[in-house]
Image (cartoon, rainbow, N blue to C red):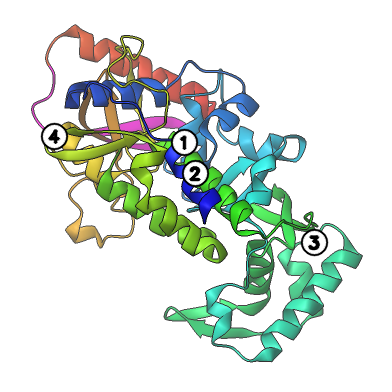
Amino acid sequence: MGIQRVLFIDNISPPIKAPSLQQLRHYTIARSLFKPTSLPRAITRLGFVQADPMRAPARAQDLILLHRVKDYRAGELERRYPRLAIEEAFFINYGFLPREALSLLHPRGTPRAWDAWDARMQARAQEVLDFVRQHGHTYPKDVQALFDHGSIKRWGSDLNVSKHLLEGLHYRGLLRVARRETGTRVYQTIEHRPQDDSPETRLTRAGQLLDMVVRLYAPLPAASLGYVCRLLVYGVPHLAAEVRQLQEHAKSRYAHAQVDGLLWFWPQGEDPGAARYQVDDRLRFLAPFDPVIWDRQRFQLFWGWEYRLEAYVPVHKRRMGHYAIPMLWGEQMLGWANLKVIDGQLLHELGFAGSRPRGSGFKLALDEALHQMQQFLEL
């Protein structure tokens, strides 16, 4: 315990001048929407790119990388994945992260969904693992063809047990995604080095993971930091006690300040009020899971309106559209856009939280953003 106490005390943040809410907004935009770089460098800088299979007009991971990778094209991440030092994995959500971060997540136990099943599920999982080890790169259909696992009722629908076993083995770190073909995962086995399981090392690993989350989504209101800690516990349930301990000592680990009555956190060594955090005048269409807008509480604090992803909301209850994506112009979150490709043409419908901007400035910025989207989609 003495070593852990020193860890927290040594990281106490020096006092800084509290930034304004506008400075926090500038800081959020400028630090996340950095100058476009290469794909490997962008993923390393972000630390994690959340994935989503829905295309409207492209997958979320591609929309996120569009603004951070020079000359990025939709689908490039999937095409280049086998040659990059990155991994698909469940972190706080499912997505992509640098390979060196993967060892921080493991060893991870069996998925919670397996706990209620009998020992037969564990035996089936071992059979699948042995098969993939012998077979090499394996498609879900290969497992389904060999094993008669059938299906079970889960979440109100039929769940393919073979596919579920593969996903569970992947979650445990016994399989990795070698590549995708037309969106389908191709698996192979993977082995991790044995971990030092001492209390000090466990706390260090949990701290590195939480630091990744804070670097990605900073600045975070205290309530949002609590939320990401809960998500991290889902990702590393074996480090739950350590994550909770880190959350309790967040003021010792991260820079922080009270702004308009709320406590905010961000990484050590960064000053949200610094002049370097400048916002440009470009217009951007941001994915629902983009780091700038991922925290819905912060979104409402910064821009004064509620954004919701309505893809899973019944049609008659939607206010914005099936896959409305926020529209950022400079530091203003004007509203949202629904983008569709029909017969090779990019169509757009815009909605505004307030009044539509007048003048040529907005039209020029919108035209440029739509042109960038066309290039990204290779239309």
Secondary structure, mark 4, is: loop
> In terms of depth relative to the viewer, which is nearer, 220 or 303?
220
Viewer-side label of 3, 2: 2
User: Alpha carbon of mark 4 to alpha carbon of mark 1: how far?
Assistant: 45 Å
Location of residue 245 in the rendering, given as x and y in whole percent from the top left corner: 43, 56
Q: Is residue 356 magenta?
A: yes
Task: Look at mark 2 in the image and give the residue it sits on.
Answer: 6
Amino acid type, residue under disc 3 in the picture: Thr
Q: Give the overall secondary structure of the magenta segment.
A: strand
- Sequence order check, earlier mark of 3 and 2: 2
Amino acid type, residue under disc 1 in the picture: Asp
Are circles 1 and 2 on residues that touch, CB within 8 Å? yes
The residue depicted at 29 percent of the width and 42 percent of the height is: 324
- Sequence order check, earlier mark of 4 and 1: 1
Secondary structure, mark 2, is: helix
Secondary structure, mark 1, is: helix
- Sequence order check, earlier mark of 3 and 4: 3
Location of residue 208 in the rendering, given as x and y in whole percent from the top left corner: 55, 43
User: Alpha carbon of mark 3 to alpha carbon of mark 2: how far?
Assistant: 47 Å
Query: Which contiguous range is marked in magenta?
Result: 337-357
Amino acid type, residue under disc 2 in the picture: Val
* Picture layout, residue 185 above or below residue 127: above
Task: Look at mark 4 in the image and give the residue it sits on.
Answer: 353
* Picture layout, residue 139 above or below residue 334: below
- Sequence order check, earlier mark of 1 and 3: 1
Mark 3 Cα-neighbour bin, 10 Å: few <14, some 14–19, many ≥20: many
Task: Look at mark 3 in the image and give the residue it sits on.
Answer: 138
User: Alpha carbon of mark 3 to alpha carbon of mark 4: how far?
Assistant: 48 Å
> In terms of depth relative to the viewer, which is nearer, 302 or 376?
302
User: Alpha carbon of mark 1 to alpha carbon of mark 3: how far?
Assistant: 48 Å
Task: Look at mark 1 in the image and give the residue it sits on.
Answer: 10
Viewer-side label of 1, 3: 1
